[in-house]
Amino acid sequence: MSSLTLELGEKCGIFGVAGHPKAASLCYYGLFALQHRGQESAGISVSDGHRLVTKKGMGLVSEVFSLKDLEDMTGPLAIGHVRYSTTGESVPQNAQPLAVKLWRGEFAVAHNGNLVNATEQRTLLESQGSIFQTTLDTEVIPHLMARSKEPEPDKAFAEVLSKLRGAFALVALHPRMLLAARDPMGIRPLCFGKLDGAIVVASETCALDSVGASIVGEIEPGEILISEGTSFSKSRFSEKKPQRLCAFEFIYFARPDSDIAGLNVHRARKLLGRKLARSHPADADLVTGVPDSSLSAASGYAEELGIPYEMGLVKNRYVGRTFIAPEQSLRELAVKLKLNPLKSILKGKRVVLVDDSIVRGTTSRHIVGLLKSAGAREVHVRISSPPYRFPCYYGIDTSSTGQLAAARMPVEEIRKEIGATTLAYLGIEDLEEVLSSAGGLCLSCFTGDYPAGTPATGPVEPIS
Amino acid sequence: MSSLTLELGEKCGIFGVAGHPKAASLCYYGLFALQHRGQESAGISVSDGHRLVTKKGMGLVSEVFSLKDLEDMTGPLAIGHVRYSTTGESVPQNAQPLAVKLWRGEFAVAHNGNLVNATEQRTLLESQGSIFQTTLDTEVIPHLMARSKEPEPDKAFAEVLSKLRGAFALVALHPRMLLAARDPMGIRPLCFGKLDGAIVVASETCALDSVGASIVGEIEPGEILISEGTSFSKSRFSEKKPQRLCAFEFIYFARPDSDIAGLNVHRARKLLGRKLARSHPADADLVTGVPDSSLSAASGYAEELGIPYEMGLVKNRYVGRTFIAPEQSLRELAVKLKLNPLKSILKGKRVVLVDDSIVRGTTSRHIVGLLKSAGAREVHVRISSPPYRFPCYYGIDTSSTGQLAAARMPVEEIRKEIGATTLAYLGIEDLEEVLSSAGGLCLSCFTGDYPAGTPATGPVEPIS
Amino acid sequence: MSSLTLELGEKCGIFGVAGHPKAASLCYYGLFALQHRGQESAGISVSDGHRLVTKKGMGLVSEVFSLKDLEDMTGPLAIGHVRYSTTGESVPQNAQPLAVKLWRGEFAVAHNGNLVNATEQRTLLESQGSIFQTTLDTEVIPHLMARSKEPEPDKAFAEVLSKLRGAFALVALHPRMLLAARDPMGIRPLCFGKLDGAIVVASETCALDSVGASIVGEIEPGEILISEGTSFSKSRFSEKKPQRLCAFEFIYFARPDSDIAGLNVHRARKLLGRKLARSHPADADLVTGVPDSSLSAASGYAEELGIPYEMGLVKNRYVGRTFIAPEQSLRELAVKLKLNPLKSILKGKRVVLVDDSIVRGTTSRHIVGLLKSAGAREVHVRISSPPYRFPCYYGIDTSSTGQLAAARMPVEEIRKEIGATTLAYLGIEDLEEVLSSAGGLCLSCFTGDYPAGTPATGPVEPIS
Amino acid sequence: MSSLTLELGEKCGIFGVAGHPKAASLCYYGLFALQHRGQESAGISVSDGHRLVTKKGMGLVSEVFSLKDLEDMTGPLAIGHVRYSTTGESVPQNAQPLAVKLWRGEFAVAHNGNLVNATEQRTLLESQGSIFQTTLDTEVIPHLMARSKEPEPDKAFAEVLSKLRGAFALVALHPRMLLAARDPMGIRPLCFGKLDGAIVVASETCALDSVGASIVGEIEPGEILISEGTSFSKSRFSEKKPQRLCAFEFIYFARPDSDIAGLNVHRARKLLGRKLARSHPADADLVTGVPDSSLSAASGYAEELGIPYEMGLVKNRYVGRTFIAPEQSLRELAVKLKLNPLKSILKGKRVVLVDDSIVRGTTSRHIVGLLKSAGAREVHVRISSPPYRFPCYYGIDTSSTGQLAAARMPVEEIRKEIGATTLAYLGIEDLEEVLSSAGGLCLSCFTGDYPAGTPATGPVEPIS
């Protein structure tokens, strides 16, 4: 939902191809389908079997690559990456894939997730003379590769992965080989499919759809997929552990047309909305959602209670990265640039506003205010997930989450702060029940229980 | 609907401000709200009371203007323009506003619509020694201004407007004065409002909302609005004629949160969907619309018949102007880049697909194919407007419409060509009934009856 | 000389081709040879016999044109222009050629010189409804062409030229025809040559050399050259008047390898130096010149007196338009960025510094100071032209000359101000004698006698 | 001379500052004065005492840095670099300074010269896990720094330098310290001076002049200069060995206003010309040189024999990196784009052409042809250095020298190939005598005797 749209940053989408004559072009189209996972930078590495060529840059996939770039990137193996957007920390050298020359040959890697032991690995490597070029946790991977004595790239890769802790879905490229791997708990998603004889790997199934690949399945937690072209093999770099898939992929991150662990995201959201309606109904004239991520949950909520579902807010799709925010003197005038409420729909009505989460609460307060200014008589806010109380160490940008509303105060306080008539959240058991078919979940942002550890060694407290 | 998204180009959105210290910045934000009316180029002219400064360029509003541009454009009077996007003919010098120096001082003008007597006026002016700089019909306006002997700019403007035939909503700027005018039949919309003491003019009310202006009303057909700042006056340059407002503004062009002639666009579309459901019901499991313009009509259709409304297609919002289309060898693979059908929703279902129009039919065939490939058992296509049979001379880009399907063949042939199970259009009387509160309509694309004449002198035939 | 390098701006170089399959590429190379006449902007118009294509922009020829530009500019007829560089007034729309569409077809024109009746012509044209796009005096030419009733372009051109007063060397393009003309007194130079069957026109012969053309001669004052390809004809638009060629072309503007009116520029400068040595000798150890324009005169001076000619100053060739001038705190440190004196050559020596002119005197003071700081015991300044006392209205940028030293004070005062041991100028009779083979000269900047009138009607006073 | 201008690439100029509040701006101006040593890329690293900031890019100093860059680069310590220009191998990541983060803090280094043991050092480092980012020999320096256990940066630097073989003049930056060093034989020059309290280091004295610094002396072979601000100290990283300063710095590379090892470059060239005149006089009407590097030698030659020195060729200064070379069909036409001979000076004359070297011979043939086509009756070529027969491994780009004329054939054959009437070279003893005051010289390109070894282990043969 929009709270998250504006406040959270998901870290990255990845894509890989082996055995297709237009591997880099397939990456380009696959990254378009994953663009919602990151708009800060984009990159592709391609191999013609001998040498890697890497092109990356700041901005959207469409801004980074020209037709000439794609024509110049020939070869049957490729990986690609889109990176999330935050302010301040974003610099070109942090774009991925990271591509380097090692003693055993060229190597490139692209990463979705977060390593919790990156700092200690980096300190150790630097004290031994390694020179880091970026501020990315991911960069420990090529440096560990450089120091591995294992001559085979796939074996060296497995050796390196066994030293990593945290959340990671990875695609990597050696001049003759595509490698893909997922952390031992499968916190971040990673699926693969086939396209004619080629192997295609992606963060989400919508990217497989976009290039016409048929879905084969998921890369299992702790597994490496290896492909030199038309065939592939799998091996394990870690013992089998219980899966802990990020629940927020269903709640907010993933595209509604993706299936994760066999469950369609739109369907899951609609069911969350229905469940929420049963546990927290409201007496209202209409239900509306915040474009775009909450629309499925909102329509589920409306359908369950038989209340009309209406378009209460229109989102301006052109307000993007390069938009110049209004200066102070115009700020109060220009309140409806991003979201405009429909007065003729809302005036005098009792409204249910369904959203997928509340992070800091400021956006929710803004939206409730918009609905009221358009004449809504009552605004009943319903959240299709439990209260978000703990920082994420596995790939959601907690540095910018600031003060988590649900960590600071009880629900009734939040209701007052956002100005809602009533406020209710989905229960955590309801969430688990709806998503049960997807297997074990990481719910750390709701519970503070971190399955893959944290960067800090001490106990984790709710942040406020 | 998407047929139109891909095939029609609406000509332009305009915005004007008088009496606000940040007039250019207001234009910038107003143009963001009108960006759906044109993505090819954008421009703003501002006056500090003595001199005009104009900045324009190719691309989106966010691409054309930098923060420094806005800071440099000081003064209380401004006009702005966004222009539609087509391929081939688009050149920087055709961006608007057109700003020139005349013997009576500087003058700038921005235009939405199409003049049907531009060619004959231009030929006459050129034979008398005028030098045209663009290929725009609009450029006859500054040249007629240059030759007017009338010293007062508003009087000269009225004199010039009386020589124009066709469709035009205009904003113009003189160093001391904002001028706005609408053609004698009001084919293109133009509304105005107030913001503190300032006057704001816009193609649509959503742009007034976006800057926080309160809506006062519409500029009437044949009227000029004149403002030097906090106050305004109105005068007529033409006798009152019956209004003929473009029906396609409601069907497709305008933003759903705009009101035109007092009628909300989302509401109108929903009513068109309900009307269509009553005249052309379908026995189906679910209703879906083509994102984004057909969603209102689709939900109206679903609601009227009590069939569930579902998300059957997801649109990739990042496929924009700079997207590199797949080369031939990848085209069949990459079929779902722009629209991806949700298999788990559609599989085995009887589906109603609501769209707002069919132009050439190729897009409709593509979408019906997508739904079927995702497993839809039946696809009942319902169009929320009458068959589109005649070219538009008043501001829709007919040069790119190519072969109009409904001009070439009967409905049953179209049904076969697009592969639908059944196909039905809204009747023209139903259309008129739903939109009746908005007053007289231009229906020329459905009827071939051109209220303001055509560029050709002979009779008009349906094009094929 | 350097005073002029830094203080005066010569207006423009022009080039034209008819009858060569690569006309635009020839223009490109010809403009390179004329780049010393203007670095602010460059432009080329080409005709394929039917349509004109024009490309122009700010900067050097090498910055404005890409290989693709040249490949796209096909056709046998072309004209080109380089424009001088000043600060402040330079804007892209003032780049030339000026290309317009007239009732009789397309037309482009490029101009070297200055029209003294441009303002009155423009006022008249604007009052009749003409819209000017630039602030160039040159723009009256296309507007007069637009209003001419003469159907043949060459006849219309002659009619227009007869209305112009001042200095002009022109090349113009009609889709089927190259036109070139020189003002009735031949104030600015214009020559032409042959290359295979093609006709080539240029401001200077060095540009004819650069493309391998053989020199035929000069376009005579008051003449038009007309060529549709391999042949050419000439006609007159004005009666024969006495020639008044700009003497400053020899003194400073032209390249040393050009011949003007049959006289080589390097040779002329060397002779000026010799003449100066005879009339104003100095008792010194060495002679040095200011790079680059004064080197010929300095070597002539040295040779005449038998004093060694030495390299006393080295010029940094990379200090160009985009150089960032030192801020105040570094200014005194960074005194030798542009010119560095050679201490080991100058230390303890009596030096003759030959320069071609003194405009404001500030640069001369700076250079004399450099020589002294490097240890020169005496600095005898010798100027190879008479005192520059009057503004130029025929193509030298007088707006930036500011206070002319020689108009403000007698020679002895100038000597004190620039810190020279002695100072002497070439006499005007000596100048005329050396250049006598070139025919009648315009000496207005020395005498205040303006052969083609001035923009002002009143008498002309020396400016101070 | 022009042969070299067109065929040889000198590797780089360096500059460093310690203890000046505008250190980065001083670097900017210092690099302008060194721009003749490299036009491919430019870069500056600055330290505020805590952190390094580095900005570099392809192109001239004026193209790489904006005013904002300089304003953003605050701090009292800085180093800068300009890199030579070749085609093909030039890529942005090879621009210098190389700036990295090491365990002991940030470090940046800029290099003029060539390391002959870089490949073996790199192979060793890579096998131990180091990841190289560039293809520069210089990059072994930061990697060796990273692996040094020495905590003090100056001691670690000395330890690293002792492992390097070949030619190197270096400036390096640690957050609190400027380091500068010169290889044990002093093959490449490096001097330093004072500016107020600050220390300034540069490849040539002309760069010290340009910022107003007074020259203190040279950094001795095998020495390190260390400065944390206003004071400096020196230490040795190598025992004293006999100096072997590159003779080509005097012959061609350095600016005429620089002094190297106490000898002025212009003076040295003039003396080389005089010496050449005595050993190889010619009976001729005039002497001319190839602009710009041979002009000093040519005037010395003329003076010695009492033959007039004339401007026989004019160089077009605007033919730079971005110039579009004429396509095949225009090549023969456009022969005089870069150098134009002065017919009126040369016609019928017996000419001595003085040049500084002949590399492949193609340029010499071209220039002799130009003089003859302009009417020269005889062309006596005199070269102010011995025959260039062996590749340089110490900083001259031998990869592009191709076939060295003097290695392939005797002098008489070269004379025929270039079309000269007579041809003579300066003797090696004459060269040594003229430059004797500068101390021991590297003459390896004339003799094949490589004082600091070669990358290959086997004996060195003249290349052909």
Image (cartoon, coloured by chain):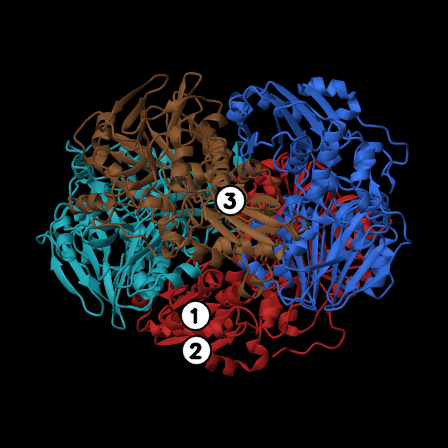
Chain colours: A red, B cyan, C brown, D blue
Whole-percent x, y for residue C376 in the image:
62, 53
Q: Nearer the viewer, mark 3 or mark 2?
A: 3
The residue indicated by pointer 2 is A420
* Amino acid tagged 2: Ala
Q: Is residue D135 above or below residue A287?
A: above
Let me know if residue C186 appears in the view.
Answer: yes
* Amino acid tagged 1: Leu
The residue indicated by pointer 1 is A353
Residue at disc 3, secondary structure: loop
Residue at disc 2, secondary structure: loop
Whole-percent x, y for residue D364 in the image:
66, 26
Which quarter of the figure has residue B235? Answer: bottom left
Q: Is residue A195 above or below residue C415?
A: above
Whole-percent x, y for residue C80 in the image:
40, 33
Let me know if residue A250 appears in the view.
Answer: no
The residue indicated by pointer 3 is B337
Which quarter of the figure has residue A315? Answer: bottom left
Q: Nearer the viewer, mark 3 or mark 1?
A: 3
Which quarter of the figure has residue D412? Answer: top right
Q: Is residue A437 above or below residue D49?
A: above
Q: Quadrant of the C terminus of chain A?
A: bottom right
Chain for mark 1? A
| Alpha carbon separation for disc pair 3 and 2 | 39 Å
Residue depicted at 85% across the width and 39% down the height: D455
